[in-house]
Amino acid sequence: MAVFKVKRHWIIGIGFVILFLLLLAFRLEVFNLGRYQLFPSRDGKAPYLSGVQELQEKESWMNISQNGQKIGYSHRHFSKTEKGHHLSESVFLQINTMGVVQGMTIKTDGNLNPDMTMSSFDFDLRSSLFRFQAHGVVDGKQITLYTEMPGSEKKTVINLKDAPHLANGILESANIAEMKEGETRSVNVFDPATMGQRPVKLTMLGDDVITIMGQERKARKISVDFMGAKQLAWIGEAGDILKEQGILGITLEQVTKSQALDGFSLNASADLTEIASVPSNVVIDDTAALAMLKVKITNIEKNNLKLNGGRQTLRKDTLVIQKETIPSRPSRVASIAGKEDFLKPSPFIQSDHQKIVSKAQEIISPDDPVSAKASKLVAWVYKNVEKRPVLSVPNALETLNNLVGDCNEHAVLLAALARAAGIPAQVEVGLVYQRGRFYYHAWNVLFIGTWVTADAVMDQMPADVTHIRFARGEADQQIDLIGVIGKVRLKVLDTSR
């Protein structure tokens, strides 16, 4: 039993990592400024670089460190093409999660129009166990996305608010070269890992001097606010990125190629899940026995989060979570009017794939009450998916093929199996209590006549009340959690059994 608790703790903590990787990848792309000249011309009347047609070929190498310890590097190349521009970026990371160090490579290739809007992209994420690939083609405000996974290629059409930009191009899109000190602008960017579009707020902070590779360099300092997560960058006189600082002690700094490729220490980096976790002011015993949890939640912007609704009630800073009950009169089919969208397949939850459908039919019986079907699916995922930290973009089909994963893989697989069985299902993300701290985690909510939480990592339905929901939905909704990481403060006010 003790061994299982340790493993379960690993899997819970890993729920945060995919959000961290998104934020890190975003920073790497946002601050790819080597192709921009942000300083004015010698006469001071206009920016030296007045238009995207003057962008030149650039190549850059960056060290990625966490609290002074190297965890990776990035290599980026920007060039002109006949139709606009091409941007390629490779990122290698060694991520420590609950004492397990794993390598990951992220590659992005983007073809950009002359105005820096995106025309197409290829995204490839690889780790020791998983691989995720996506190819997108843009037509106006619409992206046709092809996700490539073992045994499946899925086509999805996504409608966007604006003509999409990769994060790599937002600074030129915002005409940041013309920004004055203190000026702020916003640009919408598209992220291929979550297939979501979100606004980014850029603020010019002014001039500065920093030391890079032993030399003092003049720089312009820029603030970027992405979903409440704030980062800083220093841009050199030649338009090259010199340094960047973000949350959780992450720093990027310009180096030579040889410096970027050397200097790794497998045991040096801090554990990301521990750093991101939130301490509890009290020890909570036997969380499964609790009927109610009351906490004070502060230090975050709550408007974009789904803290209120269902079993959670938010009044100002006080959040009360009540444990649900399973319907006492089980029915074979729950009325799903208005819930049809939560039965549909999605790029990461392939509930219409024959392998998913066949497995769901194997697990349940057509004569089972809907609550029994849900319980059987939760128990099957709990029993059959090996609990191991993995780094990838989680998707249900690949999880079923490999039968290994962390809380993200458990959640997308359960959602797919439930939808295939006719049970509306969603993924929820937030925090859960374990061993004196609240860790980032993912679980499900299933409609069995009423919405009920379910955690396939813990084999719980309903899930215990220490599961604190911040976001609900597909990956593009889950990124709303990014503004919480490293900032949220919790105080347990009361519990009852």
Image (tube, rainbow, N blue to C red):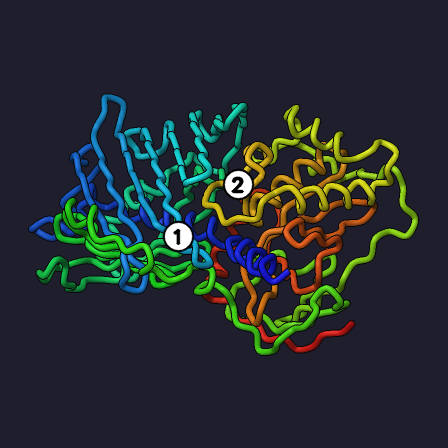
Between 456 and 166, which is closer to the camera in this rendering? 456
Q: Secondary structure at mark 1?
A: strand
Inspect the image, locate mark 1, and give the three-letter code of the amino acid beneath it. Answer: Val
Q: Is residue 90 left or right of residue 49?
A: right
Inspect the image, locate mark 2, and give the three-letter code of the amino acid beneath it. Answer: Pro
The residues bearing labels 2 and 1 have C-alpha atoms spaced at a distance of: 18 Å
Q: Residue at x 31, y 43 (%)?
A: 91
Numbered badge on residue 101: 1
The reply to whether the C-beta atoms of the residues labelled 2 and 1 are less than 8 Å apart is no
Q: Which residue is mark 2?
A: 394
Can residue 448 be seen at all in this image of the molecule?
yes
Between 82 and 66, which is closer to the camera in this rendering? 66
Between 187 and 233, which is closer to the camera in this rendering? 233
User: How far across and down, in percent of the image, does residue 380 sit?
Assistant: 70, 42
In this picture, is 302 found above or below 54?
A: below
In this picture, is 433 found above or below 417?
A: below
